[in-house]
Structures are given as C-alpha cells and as structure tokens.
Image (cartoon, rainbow, N blue to C red):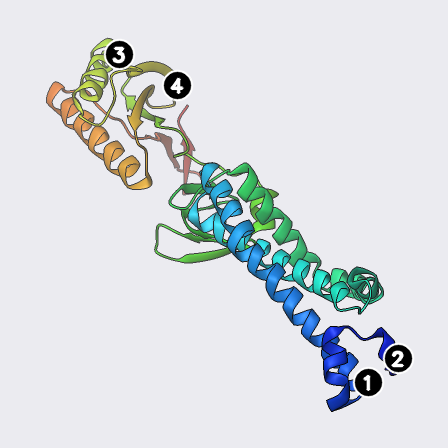
Amino acid sequence: MQAEPADDLGPIGAALEDVTGATIAASLEGLLLFLVAFAVVYGVGRVVFLPIVRRGLETRELDAHAQKPLLRLVRFGVVFFAVAIAFGFAGYGNFLVSMAGIAAAGALAVGLAMQNTISNFVSGVFIYIDKPFRIGDWIEWDGHSGVVEDISLRVTRVRTFDNELLTVPNAQLTDSVIKNPVDADELRMKFVFGIGYDDDIDEAREIILEEAKRHPDIVDDPEPSVRLTELGDSDVGLQSRFWIEDPSRADFVRIKGEYVAAVKRRFDEEGIDIPYPVRTLEGGLDLATGQDVVQPGE
C-alpha cells in the first residue's frame, strides 16, 4: 500500500501522524473508521432491524422452528451490510465491486460442488412458505410414513412408527406427493366388512352404523354411512365411512381397532358370518395310469 500524503489524512490520522508517521497513521485511521462504522451499522441492525423482522415473522404465525434459520439469514445480511458500509466509510473503496471478482470466480465452482445442497436449501424455503406440513404432523410419501420432528433448510427429520429416525433431504419431499392426513380438523376413515352371501345385508348395515354411532370418538356430523361396494368370490363387501376429530396416528389406529372389534362382536352375537376365501378341489383317481387327477372346482 502506498503512503498517503499528509493532506489526505483526517483528524484521527493527523493526530497520529507525529507519533506513527503518515503511512501508519493513514492505515490506523482507516481501520478505526472501519470498526466504528461497522459497530454502528451492526448495532442498529441488531437493535432495530432484527426485532422488526422477528415481530413480522410472529405476526405471520410462523412456527418457532421456521423462524430460527430465517433469523440466521437476516443476521448474516446485517453483518454483510455492515461490512459493506464500513468498507466504503473507511475509504477502502466499494466493497461490492471488490467482492464481485472473487464471487464470480467462486460461484461456478461452488455451484457445481453444491448442486444437491442448493436444491435442498431451495426446497426447504418452499416448505417454509407453502407449509405442506408442520412439526408433529403425520405424513406419508414414497412408501414411508412417520411424524415430523424437525424441519431445517436442508433436511427434514421424520420419526417412523417403529421409532426409526429418517433424515430426508428436502428436495425429496418437494418432488414427491406428500399425504398429510392430520392437516384438517377432521379425518374420514373407511373399512370394508365382508359378510356371507346368505347373511342379511340390511341387518349387517344396521349393526355397522349402530357401532359407529356408539363409539365416543366417531363424530355424528358428518354422520357415518355404509355402502355395498364389493361382490367378492366368497363375501359381500360393506364399506363403512366415518369421521374422527383431531386426527393423529395414535387415535387413528386405536379408534379403528376398537370400532372393528365392536362390529365383529355384534356380528358373532347376531350370527352374521365373516367368511374367508374357500377353494374347492374336484378330481379322481385315473386307474389306467395310477395318478391322481385333481382339478380346481369352478
């Protein structure tokens, strides 16, 4: 760095010139101006700007886990802005212009090396904006299911119902169809009861409806319904449709199990059969060859 003329020194540099010399005085003056400007801009950003951003996120009712990475980005922006202002205030030139060459040179290499990371980061931003699920939601995707434990800008952590932790890149979730059964306040459930062809369909339908209305966790509005949906090889399928409130995986499994067990008990009491597939074999012994000839019955 070339020594600056004494006439170009500010008050701080002029005061230090007699002690350190013009060159060192100019360097110290620039450093002090840089530190002072940085401290002022950074302090204003932390005291004024960050609280405004935090209140804005809270006004939008953004979850606490979603606020942390966004506030971290805002803090980084405050630091970057403070450095840029201090850089110019100290007389070092335009910080953005100085960084442009370095940024352009490194952008290509970083972009190629971090394609997946950038893709996951962008996907994480869309998850925060679109809110397809929240922490505590039960979600299903690509043959996997579980409860969301954490959402970051790169990955989402899901706890399966076997207590396994899945760390899922966000890009996989945004590129797939996600089922969120607990997004709404109510969830409709379905179950098909099979009865024998000789059983009374109307009686079976009444039992299914009565047990649905009797269960305390099955809502009356919308009311349960039963429809004949299948004529199988060995049974007649009656599909029950009913609704539950405040759905969760635990409630879903418990309520469905209790309801099906109650209908099964009533079927047994009323003599309504729940058949299982039966295959009839027909045939005989071929005396000429000594071999059994068995054919499935029609």
Instruction: Name the outermost residue toward the top.
Output: 202
Mark 1 surroundings within 10 Å by alpha-carbon count, few (fewer than 14), some (14 through 19), many (20 or more): many
Residue corresponding to mark 1: 22
Give the distance between the C-alpha atoms of the residues marked 3 and 4, in whole angstroms. Answer: 12 Å
| Quarter where residue 187 is shown | top left
Q: Earlier in the sequence, mark 2 or mark 3?
A: 2
Per the rendering, the mark at residue 193 is: none
Identified at 21% across, 23% down, the residue is: 273
Q: Earlier in the sequence, mark 2 or mark 1?
A: 2
Give the distance between the C-alpha atoms of the residues marked 2 and 3, in whole angstroms. Answer: 104 Å
In this picture, residue 116 sits left or right of residue 262: right
Residue 43 position, x and y percent, is 56, 60
Per the rendering, the mark at residue 5 is: 2
Residue 99 position, x and y percent, is 80, 65
The reply to whether dot 2 and dot 1 touch (C-beta < 8 Å) is yes
Mark 4 surroundings within 10 Å by alpha-carbon count, few (fewer than 14), some (14 through 19), many (20 or more): some
Quadrant containing the C terminus is: top left
Identified at 39% across, 27% down, the residue is: 297
| Quarter where residue 202 is shown | top left
Question: Which residue is more in the foreground, 94 or 16?
Answer: 16
Residue 5 position, x and y percent, is 88, 79
Disc number lying in front (2 or 3) = 2
**Residue 11 appears in the rendering:** yes
Mark 3 surroundings within 10 Å by alpha-carbon count, few (fewer than 14), some (14 through 19), many (20 or more): some
Disc number lying in front (3 or 1) = 1
Question: Which residue is more in the foreground, 19 or 143?
Answer: 19
Disc number lying in front (4 or 2) = 2
